[in-house]
Amino acid sequence: MSINAYKPKEIKSLSRIFKILGEPNRLKILTSLGLECRPVSAIVASTGLTQTNVSFHLRVLREAGLVKAEKNGSFVFYCLPEPELRVIIDHFQYWNSSSTSTKKN
């Protein structure tokens, strides 16, 4: 792939996604989710964040397409839209762990 493989519009879009993922609480929420949708109360319990904080970040993640919302009665359940998203995050964590341990040696 050449250095200029992405168009400016694609770079801007990717930059926006990385900025959203750069917020630690949003990343904490994403890593607490799987493909099975969970209510906000379960996300609050697994992340230790407040309900208000979780709801705020879920809105940002939903608008970016990084989570999907499914209404079930009076509750809204959230999950990852694609399993590949979790794989990508896991790859970044593996890369980060590998590069950090390499630098220490």
Image (cartoon, helix red, strand yellow):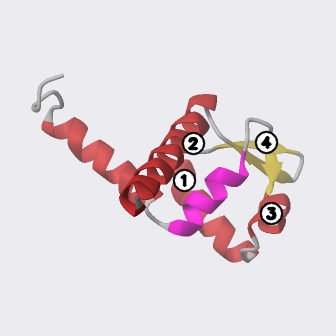
The amino acid type, in three-letter code, at marker 2 is Asp
Q: Outermost residue toward the right?
A: 73
| Label 4: how many Cα within 10 Å (few below 14, some 14–19, many 20+) | some
Question: Picture coordinates of residue 40 (x, y %)?
Answer: 78, 60
Q: Which mark is residue 17?
A: none
Tag 1 or tag 2, which sits nearer the N-term? Answer: 1
Residue drawn 61% across and 45% down? 67
Residue under label 2: 90
Question: Picture coordinates of residue 66 (x, y %)?
Answer: 54, 44
Question: Eyeballing the image, is 41 above or below 67?
Answer: below
| Label 3: how many Cα within 10 Å (few below 14, some 14–19, many 20+) | few
Say if mark 2 contacts mark 1, CB within 8 Å: no
Distance (Cα) linking label 3 and label 1: 17 Å
Tag 1 or tag 4, which sits nearer the N-term? Answer: 4
Question: Eyeballing the image, is 90 above or below 15?
Answer: above
Distance (Cα) linking label 3 and label 2: 18 Å
Q: Which mark is residue 37?
A: 4
Tag 1 or tag 3, which sits nearer the N-term? Answer: 3
Tag 4 or tag 2, which sits nearer the N-term? Answer: 4
Task: Please state which of residues 73 and 56 is positioned toward the viewer in this rendering.
Answer: 56
Residue 36 shown left or right of residue 60 in the figure: right
Residue under label 1: 61
Residue drawn 40% across and 58% down? 105
Say if mark 3 contacts mark 1, CB within 8 Å: no
Residue under label 3: 46
Residue 39 shown left or right of residue 93 in the figure: right
Residue drawn 62% across and 52% down? 30
Dot 2 falls on a residue whose secondary structure is helix
